[in-house]
Amino acid sequence: MNSDDEAHFSGGFSWNSIFFSLPPPILLPSPFCFRGAQLAHAVAATSSGKNGHTFPSGRAACLFRFHFAQENVMAHVNPIQLQKFLKGVDYPANKQALIDNAKSLGADENVCSTLEQLPDEDFLTPADVSQAFGKLSDTGEKRAPSTGTGGNEFLAQATQDSLAEIELCELALQKSSNDQVKVFAQQMIDEHSQMGREIEQLASRKKIDLPKKVSSEDKSSTAEMAKLNGQDFDRQFIEHNVKDHEKDIKVFRHYAEQEQDADIRSLAEKGVKMLTHHLNMAKGIEKKLPT
């Protein structure tokens, strides 16, 4: 036995009594059975101490701390993190579609395990997902005050999307030789920048934190598009905007119709008009691009 492993307890204390008195973690990962077996093996790998008391060996103690910490980390997923991995979901979508989308965007086990706990139903909008997430057992995670309909998360995601659109359109100004594409890209930059400023002002009044930079997923998407040139770039850029705006309009329309907060509802209404105009522009350009 290593001296580091030696411990002295009194009053009939045993390590096993501590282990079996611990409350179960709030969120359980899908492969818990496998890790639970490892944990049980680690706890069983104990050494006998003085007075017949038991305690885990150095390796077993490390495994215990690792697994117990890992189970509790599963709980720390907030709504903003969740929505980041649901970008691009084609609503309505069921739980499995959400999980598959999250995995395709590189979601870790924490996020996937959280999605596993959502109810087996169809979600019509991101707000429905946020509401279902809010009904899960409280994990102790500090959250921004919520309107109850996901309005805060909507503002955060709208900001994230605007930042990504602006960066992509700046790339289009550099890469495209099509005048219509360039006019479209510049108008997108101007109007998304204005929308972004309005969201920032609203969020500041309501004390809502917003993302400040483009997400790693959006950066990767832009980097892939940067590899294209000429007509290939133009077509991919316009197709991307048609698909993205069709999905965004669904989300903005939902908040324009259902949001309880009047300020957020008004902003969403304005966003629907802007996005619809952009979508019509993109579709018009798409028809004129050479095949």
Image: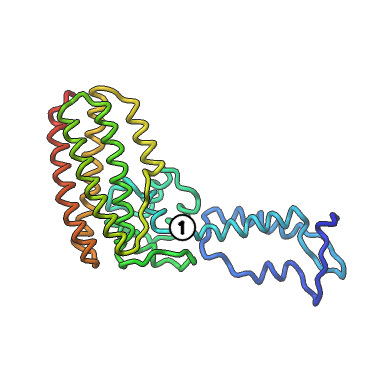
- Who's the residue at 25% across and 22% down the image? 230
Vertical relation: 206 (above or below) 223: below
Q: Quadrant of residue 50?
A: bottom right
Q: Quadrant of residue 282?
A: top left
Instruction: Choose between 132 and 152: the one closer to the eye.
Output: 152
Instruction: Choose between 135 and 282: the one closer to the eye.
Output: 282
Horizontally, residue 16 falls left or right of residue 155, namely right
Q: Report the number of numbered marks.
A: 1
Q: Quadrant of the C terminus?
A: top left
Instruction: Choose between 21 and 287: the one closer to the eye.
Output: 287
- The x, y position of residue 255, in whole percent, is 23, 59
- The residue wearing badge 1 is 77
- The x, y position of residue 174, in whole percent, is 27, 27
Horizontally, residue 244 falls left or right of residue 7, namely left
Q: Residue furthest bottom?
A: 11
**Rendering colour mode:** rainbow
- What amino acid does circle 1 point to? Val
For label 1, the SS is loop
Label 1 crowd bin: few (<14), some (14–19), many (20+), radius 10 Å? some
- The x, y position of residue 95, in whole percent, is 37, 54
Q: Quadrant of the N terminus?
A: bottom right
- The x, y position of residue 32, in whole percent, is 57, 56
- Who's the residue at 20% across and 42% down the image? 190
